[in-house]
Image (cartoon, rainbow, N blue to C red):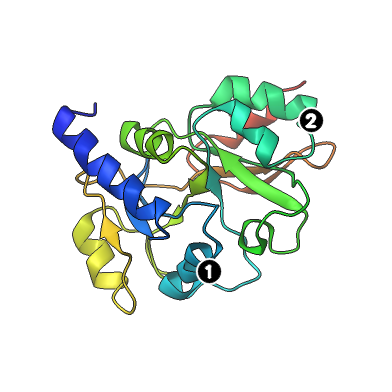
Amino acid sequence: MVLSTDHALIQQAADIMRKGGVVAFPTETSYGLGASIKQVYALERIYIIKKRPRYKPLLILISNISDLIHLVRQVPATAVVLMERFWPGPLTLLLPAKPGLPWPLCANTGKVGVRISSHSWAHSLVTALGSPMTATSANISKYPAACNAEEIKDQLRAPPPDYILDGGPTSGGAPSTIVDVCTEPFKIIREGIIDPKDITGVSA
């Protein structure tokens, strides 16, 4: 539930991202690092903040399925079924990337990872921003995920994100499940919070 006072904080975070800032925000499992995909410099800063290898692309949050038109070349039939079953939720789908996207979103893979969050703060944030944003975890690469503001401050010090949207502690646990629907049959790339059996049981 997002209260009116929370909306003010969310709008502040969206304004920071709109101007090229990087914001830590709560998701279903841990905190993420958000930057507008329209701000390439901010996307590149996330790699510096996380000390993330540049060959690993950044996952994306969208507010509505209609946002896919700006990100992907096509939506395979299997992807549609998975979206209907698991979105909003912690399922990231790798889809055929539209040409011309900033390199941090694809990292020369030709694919882009997208999901719609079921967390009220995360969904409200991307909606307030008015464009897709990144959803990579707010921690140094290969370090434990951060589940509250203090853990973010402890890990991400040099340099830190521009703002922490403090929505209180998150549930923790496994990250979002990543499924590549560019192949036939689709492949589970990262096992996450969703039971793999629930995914493999879905068919177009």
Q: Circle 1 — which element?
A: helix
Give the image location of residue 138, x and y in percent.
38, 60
Image x and y of residue 121, in percent: 31, 36
Q: CA distance from mark 2 to mark 1?
A: 29 Å
Residue under circle 2? 76
Determine which quarter of the picture holds residue 79.
top right
* Residue 174 can be seen, yes or no: yes
Q: Residue 49 at x, y = what percent?
A: 41, 72
Work out whether residue 183 or residue 75 is closer to the camera in this orientation and state it: 75
Crowdedness of circle 2 by 10 Å Cα count: few (<14), some, many (20+)? some
Q: Is residue 86 left or right of residue 156?
A: right
171 shown above or below 51: above
Residue at position x 37%, y 42% from top? Answer: 27
The reply to whether callout 2 and callout 1 are in contact (CB within 8 Å) is no
Q: Residue at x 49, y 27 (%)?
A: 88
Q: Amino acid at mark 1?
A: Glu
Give residue 53's position: percent from left, percent from top. 58, 74
Say which residue appears at 53% left-offset and 69% top-offset: 44
Q: Could you say whether the residue bearing mark 2 is in a helix, strand or loop?
A: loop
Image height of 66 relative to 181, above or below: above
- Which residue matches tag 1? 44
